[in-house]
Image: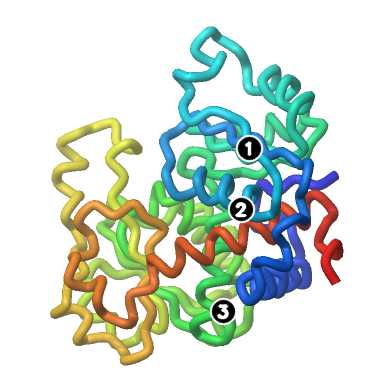
Amino acid sequence: MRHFLSPTDFSLEEWDKLLDLAEAIKNNPEKYAHVCDGKKIATLFYEASTRTRLSFEAAMLSLGGSVLGFHSAESSSVSKGESVSDTIRVISCFADICAMRHPKEGAPMVAASKSKIPVINAGDGGHQHPSQTLTDLFTIRSLKGRLDHLTIGLCGDLKFGRTVHSLINALTRYEGIRFVLISPEALRVPSYIRREVLEQKNIPFKEVENLDEVMPELDILYMTRIQKERFFNEEEYIRLKDSYILDAAKMKLAKEDMLVLHPLPRVNEIAVEVDDDPRAAYFKQVQYGMYARMALIMTLLGLEDAVC
């Protein structure tokens, strides 16, 4: 039994196999429509979610399985004081696999230590979001044709942005990756990621505050929202929330084949006018996320070779 708590839980070879399987599913989803007949996924979401929760549920339903779970802490026994450890012990009696989102960093790891079924980290606080990373890599590879020799711009909340942290960890495994980290000083990438991931692996990167000046360099621009729920001080959130707004004027500065990604939801950091730009890939990213999670579920359940 394996869990998926961090991008580093799978080797580079295993990542590539996951992406190959996601591509096969995307090209012929009907072929995989009954792979998980009789299987159940539990979606345990202690924190609000639209795309991730529905993506996991749609993925399992598309594989022929079924879904159970809860969509908020208030609708679960945690409101009565039940621990994560006890919850997963109970869920292990009902489901075959579990996707968990929790506001506390490390909660899915605690669950995995007590679980009898595979646990997927669907986001733990501001720490990691590895299934979103799988989605991001699949989107980039599908649309750019490669995951190496790319300049990746990460823009917005790089301090609390768990999608950013996971993506950096994953992309540093590929050759020729360079990062441009675009954020206000107060929302820079945490020092442990800079030190233990980027610097230790000799990954070229630079930190800037001005988006316009680096737009021409980028192959990928990964936008993130300033996350109100991660701030303890509302005045600080208000001061920073409009730091970056990607609009049509900024898009004119970019390469013709640059891709714009966003884990969503957006607030105002991408103007609606950008949606019609062929380089805007964030809604395709949502669709690709379902295929990526279908591949992940199959792999963790040992069903990756069930369809020949």
Work out whether residue 202 or residue 75 is closer to the camera in this orientation and state it: 75
Secondary element at tag 1: strand
Q: Earlier in the sequence, mark 3 or mark 2?
A: 2
Quarter holding the N terminus is top right
Q: Which mark is residue 141?
A: 3
Q: CA distance from mark 2 to mark 1?
A: 10 Å
Is the residue 133 above or below the residue 259 in the image?
Answer: above
Q: For mark 3, does the 10 Å Cα neighbourhood hold few (<14), some (14 to 19), or many (20 or more) residues?
A: some
Relative side of 239 to 295, left or right: left
Q: For mark 2, does the 10 Å Cα neighbourhood hold few (<14), some (14 to 19), or many (20 or more) residues?
A: many
Mark 3 vs mark 2: in front: 2
**Residue labelled with disc 2:** 59
Work out whether residue 230 or residue 131 is closer to the camera in this orientation and state it: 131
Work out whether residue 196 or residue 52 is closer to the camera in this orientation and state it: 52
Badge 3 amino acid? Arg
Based on the displayed image, in which of its 4 quarters is residue 106 positioned? Answer: top right
Q: Which mark is residue 67?
A: 1
- Seen at 55% across and 75% down, the residue is 203
